[in-house]
């Protein structure tokens, strides 16, 4: 089975997903002059966001320009049975009503279907953890931990032991190693590992 995600983990952002149709999105990288104003705006934006520490999927029931408005949506969602729904701050001017902790796209679609029965139309969106600055070599991305076990076993058979696992951006799981001192070292490692194992090892900053 081919990797589900190739470079999705490199770019932090949000990718909306629709049932039965996965829309591929290319992120545009915009060059910015590093002035004091740009740096200050970026820092303020980050301070406004609710921290995200783990990749996954979320159902977004609505967005609003005030927390009070988003809280009303969340309260309505909770009333119809989605007890784990919560209000989180997405930016300095936007709050959203969300349901998190969803492990797979199939589960998200099922929950979305239940929500539509009670007159809510949430979107399924990719939740990416904030970067911690760690350079990682990803040995593979698979839909389930069972399938990822085959990747780990193959890597082990060629001497690459001690791989860690984590949730992948946009669903699924990844096997990886970290501890690199820089990108040059990581890319050299990934090239050699790919040649030896036959796996497509990529480098990301997570």
Image: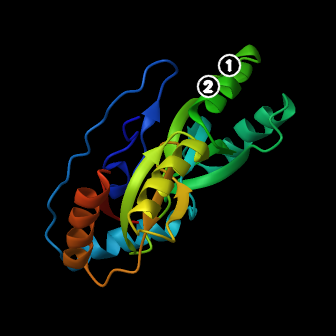
Determine the residue positioned at 42% across, 40% down. Answer: 15
The spot of residue 25 in percent (x, y) is 30, 35
Residue placed most toward the observer, 33 or 18: 18
The spot of residue 123 in percent (x, y) is 55, 30
Q: Quadrant of the image for the C terminus?
A: bottom left
Residue designated by label 1: 113
- Label 1: state its secondary structure: helix
Determine the residue positioned at 26% across, 45% down. Answer: 27
Residue 24 is left or right of residue 36, and the answer is right
Q: Quadrant of the image for the N terminus?
A: top left
Residue designated by label 2: 109
Q: Give residue 155's quadrant in the image.
A: bottom left
Determine the residue positioned at 18% across, 74% down. Answer: 34
Residue placed most toward the observer, 170 or 95: 170
Callout 2 touching callout 1 (CB < 8 Å): yes
Q: Say few, some or many: other residues with alpha carbon within 10 Å of mark 1 (under 14 / 14 to 19 / 20 or more).
A: some
Q: Say few, some or many: other residues with alpha carbon within 10 Å of mark 2 (under 14 / 14 to 19 / 20 or more).
A: some
The spot of residue 7 in percent (x, y) is 31, 50
Q: CA distance from mark 2 to mark 1?
A: 6 Å
């Amino acid at each position: 089975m081919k990797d589900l995600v190739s470079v999705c983990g490199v770019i932090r952002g949000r990718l909306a997903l629709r049932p039965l149709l996965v829309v591929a999105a290319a992120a545009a990288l915009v060059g910015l002059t590093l002035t004091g104003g740009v740096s200050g705006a970026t820092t303020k934006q980050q301070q406004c966001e609710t921290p995200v520490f783990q990749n996954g999927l979320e159902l977004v029931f609505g967005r609003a320009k005030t927390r009070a408005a988003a809280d009303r949506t969340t309260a309505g969602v909770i009333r119809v049975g989605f007890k784990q729904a919560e209000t989180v701050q997405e930016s300095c001017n936007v709050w959203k009503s969300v349901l998190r902790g969803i492990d797979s796209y199939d589960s998200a679609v099922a929950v979305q279907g239940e929500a539509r029965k009670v007159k809510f139309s949430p979107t399924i969106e990719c939740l990416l953890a904030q970067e911690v600055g760690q350079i990682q070599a990803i040995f593979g991305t698979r839909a389930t931990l069972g399938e990822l076990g085959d990747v780990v076993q193959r890597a082990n058979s060629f001497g690459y032991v001690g791989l860690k696992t984590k949730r992948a951006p946009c669903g699924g799981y990844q096997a990886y190693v970290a501890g690199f001192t820089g990108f040059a070292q990581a890319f050299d490692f990934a090239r050699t590992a790919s040649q030896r194992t036959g796996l497509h090892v990529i480098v990301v900053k997570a």
